[in-house]
Image (spheres, helix red, strand yellow):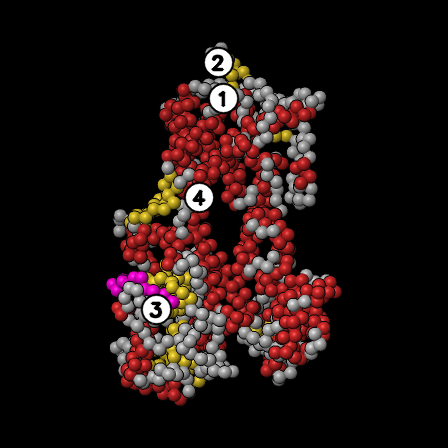
Amino acid sequence: MSTRPRRQAARKNIVIEISDSEDNASEANDNDEYKPRETHRRFIDRAAAAVASGASTKRKRGNDSKSNAPESKEKRAKQDKENALPNQINDVNETSVEPPLPTVLPQDEGEHRTLPVASSSTTGRSSFWERRKVWNIHELLAETEHIQPTAARNIVQLFENENTIPFICRYRRDLVDHITPDRLRDIRNTYSEIVDLRKKAENIVNQLERENMINTEIREELLCAKTNEELEFLYAPYKPASKGTLAERAKALGLEQYADALLYGTAPIVQLSSAVDSSNKDLATEEQIMVGICNIIIHNISKNTSVLEELRRLQNVQRIVLKCSKTKSTTASKEEKKSKVASGGIADKKLDSSKFENYFNFQCDVKTIKPHQTLAINRGEKHKFLTVKVETNNYLKSDLTRFISEQYMSQGLQYPLRREVFTRALEECYTKKLQPLLCRQIRAKLKEKAIRAAIEVFAKNLKQLLLMSPLKGERILGIDPGYTNGCKLALISETADVLESGVIYPHGRHANRKEAEQKLVQLLTKHNCRVIALGNGTACRDTEMWLTSLFQAGILDNRSIRYSIVNENGASIYSCSTVATKEFPNMDMNLISAVSIARRLNDPLSEYVKIEPRHLGVGMYQHDVNEKMLTETLNDVVSECVSFVGVDLNTASLSVLKHIAGLSEKKAEKIIEHRTQKGPFKSRKDLLTVRSIGEKTYVQCAGFVRIEPLSVGGALTNPLDCTWVHPESYQLAETIIGKCDLKISDIGKARFIQSIKEFSTSEQNLKELAAKHKLPIDRLKFVLVALQRELLQDYRLDLDKRPLFKQGLTRLDELSIGDVVTGAVTNVTHFGAFVDIGVERDGLIHKNHMNNIELSIGDRIIASVQKVDIQRRQLGLRLENMLEETDTSFTLKAE
């Protein structure tokens, strides 16, 4: 029966008892709820037991400690210095004391050899771990995210009390050092990881304590681990090994005692011939015995935490290269392609080797490789287009083998067989265990970093897309372009109601351009519509060419009619959803996509929230990242955008309302059910009458819902219900309004805003109010800012991201290098930004050509053409300048 491999300290330990008179460490942890009990013994590994020639008696160190305590401290300091790893020597205070007495072992041949005292580093525990302290969650959060300890403590408390990110960033930002929502979202993810790490460490400790495998000191080590990686290699010696491993088989044959004697140099000297057993086919020869012993030694070395720690250190100091090459055999890739086609994977069918040609002969230092490169390489390797390997230099191998040799071979009996077996085992250990482990760790780190970067890009782009300015007061014709099934049309009113729909066939085998022109002009004229929203999917550029020809022929009036390209990703998915079926029960689902396209121009936020964010196509390698992590992040972004824009409590749809901070789909349904049965809400406070809406939920969502005058017949019970002011600050707001000799009914008027602005410039006023209401100045300032906003002013107008309107399309072959063009950013990645400049393809501004300017979706830019590749349909641009005016060709109707 195989046994679980234990730390080398588990057997034949010399226990050195010391008096723990140093109180400074214990005082530092007095308030730590995870503080382990005091340790009075230190366990040294079986290499130290070898010094005692197998004796099990305890040897006491520092016999004079009672009479000379200071000297005992000096000796312990000296011993710590000797036990420290090579790269940690400088951290130990130097003290000039005499070295410990050597140990003399009798040899079988009658001679005596002198051996050094065993170092505790051979146990897999270095002096680095002795200096660690068990952390609190807020302490590790502050250290990991580089934020102030006070802010970290507040953040932990806010998250423990289930506060949402929008609420914290708007109404509690003074407690978190005014951290942005994006930054706070990253911190929240780190906080969740730290909580999971603590739970995992405690579970491991509890499990090992039940099995009586660790002491208090090891318990503290496990609870000190600050990353999952650290915890894993501290736990490695205690993990149960598989019964089928080579090491376990060798142990079952009784070879463990020989392996331990050779690894640690314990007496007596090992003779392989003494282990030969002709009756056992696995022990019939000395070579078989040596192989079994090597397998046990390989296992022990690979589980040594000092070795793993050194391996991790070398990753950071040595040059390691990731190399890619084109897969030589095409058989595997063909089989892979067949399997994908069979499984119906749409995205995979579009893959071919040409997409990865940049990586057919690629190498890069793992410290400088970019996230998008890592994701591309991983995808190419997954589909068997690329062969990837991690290459290390000889220095890393030599440094690691030297370190391991010093750990084991610097002590114990020295004889040829021991050196031969150790050299052989060490070479195999590096080749079979340590180098593959190094490669796996590096690839895992690169993948994790790339996934985080991809999710970050997706979140940023989604936020910019959702916060595009709405186009109010216009009738809009949505066109979902297509070939065989035609171009679907849907015309909506100023309030997004569907006025008329239909299908035209300007392309494909059923094309009838004359009839299509007549129907298009008839729709626009009949409903006095002058805005066209064209989806950017299949047949988009052909339809755009057709519209351009209509402008050129004078069929469409270029003085009044404009069109805009709209992101139609997810429109077909939405048209088949239950949400669309409930909204348009009698409409053909093919036409619903055209309605969605038109509404995306009318009010992007209200329409995009109906679709799962990952279907909106504004990310980078979204199919290669963790789906759960991506979904959670994107849902947080949607909630943040919806909350900051705000909704009318009496008119908001379920799709929008469920994303408000603090609300869920079930709670949103209860709100809609309440207003349907009992009429519109008169004030924010009426939310508390809704079932399932308690005080905690109300606090989180109240500041992000408003009561608009039109929804309650024009008269508001409290005009503050239509502002950003949170109900908890109504008393403060009323005090400010009274001090300015204003009326609450004047909120939003020019005179009111001017008076509040003048009041807020007085520091004396702010200090008096803050003292009276016992509030931080920052929270007071926010209330003043909220009172200075116009009533019902849209948050998205502050960002000024309006749609780009055009009246024609330029062909790619009409461009030449050096041409200056204007356009709008449609997508942003780590390697550059894609820009719609009015040709068949979006152009790419590589990050090297951005002039250190950070772009976001919707930005208007001036660029110069750097590359035109007609054959590959590629367009390269250089950023020249930003356009201040977001739209000079189109004027909104006065509301």
Give the quadrant of residue 748.
bottom right
Q: Earlier in the sequence, mark 2 or mark 4?
A: 2
The amino acid sitting under disc 3 is: Val
Q: Earlier in the sequence, mark 2 or mark 1?
A: 2
Dot 2, crowdedness within 10 Å: few (<14), some or many (≥20)? few
User: Residues under labels 2 and 1: Cα distance?
Assistant: 14 Å
Q: Nearer the viewer, residue 753 or 146?
A: 753
Residue at horizontal 45%, vertical 47%? 445
Farthest residue to the right: give it: 772
Residue at horizontal 40%, vertical 65%? 881
Residue that carries the numbered disc 3 in the rendered image: 821
Q: Earlier in the sequence, mark 4 or mark 1?
A: 1
Tell us which disc is closer to us: 2 or 1.
Answer: 1
Is 822 inside the magenta-drawn segment? no
Residue that carries the numbered disc 4 in the rendered image: 441
Q: Earlier in the sequence, mark 4 or mark 3?
A: 4
Dot 1, crowdedness within 10 Å: few (<14), some or many (≥20)? many
Residue that carries the numbered disc 2 in the rendered image: 108
Residue that carries the numbered disc 1 in the rendered image: 412
Q: Is residue 349 above or below residue 537?
A: above
User: Residues under labels 4 and 1: Cα distance?
Assistant: 33 Å
Element on which disc 4 rests:
helix
Give the quadrant of residue 166.
bottom right
Residue 205 at what x, y percent from top left?
59, 41
User: Residues under labels 2 and 3: Cα distance?
Assistant: 90 Å
Q: Which residues are magenta?
A: 862-874
Element on which disc 2 rests:
loop
